[in-house]
Amino acid sequence: MQQRVAHAGQSHSMILLEMVDAVLQDGGLRLDALDGIAYGAGPGSFTGLRIACATAQGLAFAAGIPLAGIGTLQALAAGCGAARVICCLDARMQEIYHAAYRCEGGVCMEVSAPRVCAPDAAPQLEGGGWAGCGSGFAAYREVLGQRYGAQLAVIDGAAHPQARDIAQLAAPVFAGGGGIPAEQAAPLYIRDRVAVKT
């Protein structure tokens, strides 16, 4: 599966379409030959989510193909490769985006729904053998380590949601004739507060 990865900081809106074009050219594909377009719906950076959704909408409108919004925490779990995954992304403002999944055969079932919370208020989970993945574990390793203790078998604070995992999660949606029209696409915001008030 073709994938382009870049840590673009604030310039992702300027390079995204070039990266899409490069992947299509590498695969010898035209946009209108695709079954659909998947995008990372969130949670995550508000600006990043809006750029991802708007770009996917524009491409889907142009090609007349459906969209599938895939949760970034679910994609992170799928890419982790573990059977039990706690996903935490740094949400800034002393909070994390959190969800937990059981994964088997490329399917990740939700154990704890995506939410935003303080690291020390992360939901309790049953059993052990959990893998902790995501930037939340890098930013709040000590707090989350105390919260889950011996339940954590491994921690990967450098893990990020990847385009290939979003595509793999969306493939069965499109194969089954699913997806949504471009005008119905929207980011998944689980936080309604975007700034710290003093």
Image: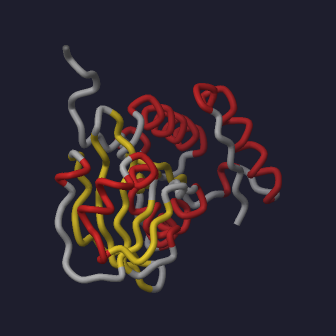
**Relative to residue 182, is residue 71 depicted above or below?**
below
Residue 60's image quarter?
Answer: top right
Snapshot colouring: secondary structure
Q: Is residue 78 visible?
A: yes
- Nearest to the observer: residue 6 or residue 188: 6
Q: Residue at x 39, y 79 (%)?
A: 103
Q: Where is residue 89 in the image (x, y as percent from the top left)?
A: 39, 49
Q: Can residue 180 be seen in this view?
A: no
Q: Which residue is drawn at 65% across and 50% down?
A: 32
- Nearest to the observer: residue 34 or residue 140: 140
- Nearest to the observer: residue 162 or residue 60: 162
Q: In the figure, is residue 155 to the left or right of 164? A: left
Q: Residue at x 29, y 60 (%)?
A: 99
Number of marks in picture? 0
Residue 184's image quarter?
Answer: top left
Q: Position of residue 8 (x, y in %)?
A: 65, 34
Q: Position of residue 16 (x, y in %)?
A: 65, 36
Q: Position of residue 39 (x, y in %)?
A: 49, 49
The C terminus sits in image quarter: top left
Residue 58's image quarter?
Answer: top right
Q: Residue at x 44, y 29 (%)?
A: 47
**Relative to residue 113, is residue 83 depicted above or below?**
below
The N terminus sits in image quarter: bottom right
Q: In the figure, is residue 19 to the left or right of 83? A: right
